Amino acid sequence: MAIEEGVKAPNFCLEDQEGNKVSLEDFKGKKIALYFYSKDNTPGCTRQACSFAENYLKLKALNVEVIGISKDLPASHTKFKEKYNLPFTLLCDPEHQASEAFGVWVLKKMYGKENYSTLRSCFLIDENGVIIKRWLRLKPELNASLVLEFLGAQN
């Protein structure tokens, strides 16, 4: 079950697209739109990433850092970022450490087969590391607009 709103986000340390170690603590003092997706270069995940890229400047103006997490490795993330001109950090979670901590590594059933995969989701984390909003089972293209809409309602 996905982690609830109002609790401290679990910290993690993962590699980014360049192989650098990145921790959630690195963003203390900023809001974070932390989104989880299944795989680079798939149709839904591409729409999700492009949604954040198209709204990136609006989010930055609201002091929001965007971070995407999938089980892909740095080389895949680098190609994905370059292909779609993604201006934000992508983190590698091949052992699904962060996905499990946030409760979005789930058993899915597709075509009669069951396997574990990442639940498309987004968590808005405040400057103190507390989850202030979560969205689960999202339509990919709505991620960034939902974050912006929520933040607009907060002002």
Image (cartoon, helix red, strand yellow):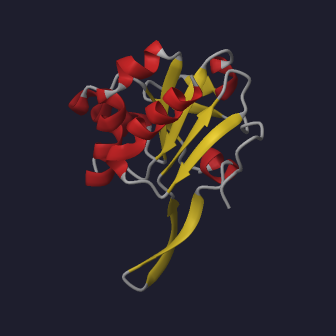
Q: Residue furthest bottom?
A: 112
Q: Could one spot residue 40 in this view of the protein?
A: no
Q: Quadrant of the N terminus?
A: bottom right
Count of numbered labels shown in the rendering:
0
- Which residue: 44% across, 82% down? 113
The residue lying toward the viewer, choosing from 45 and 82, is: 45
Residue appearing at x 68%, y 18% in the figure? 28
Q: Quadrant of the C terminus?
A: top right
Q: Nearer the viewer, residue 35 or 13?
A: 35
Which residue: 47% across, 53% down? 120
Res 111 quadrant in image: bottom left
**In the orientation shown, which residue stands out farthest toward the right?**
7
- Residue 80: percent from left, percent from top: 30, 36
53 relative to 38, above or below: above
**From the viewer's perspective, is 1 left or right of 39?**
right
Q: Is residue 125 left or right of residue 55?
A: right
Across and down, in percent, residue 34 comes to 54, 36
Q: Residue 59 versus residue 12: which sits nearer the camera? A: 59
Residue 50 in sight from this viewpoint:
yes
Residue 46 rendering spot, x and y as whole percentages = 29, 44
* Residue 153 rendering spot, x and y as whole percentages: 53, 31
| Residue for point 50% across, 62% down | 117
* Residue 74 lies in quadrant: top left
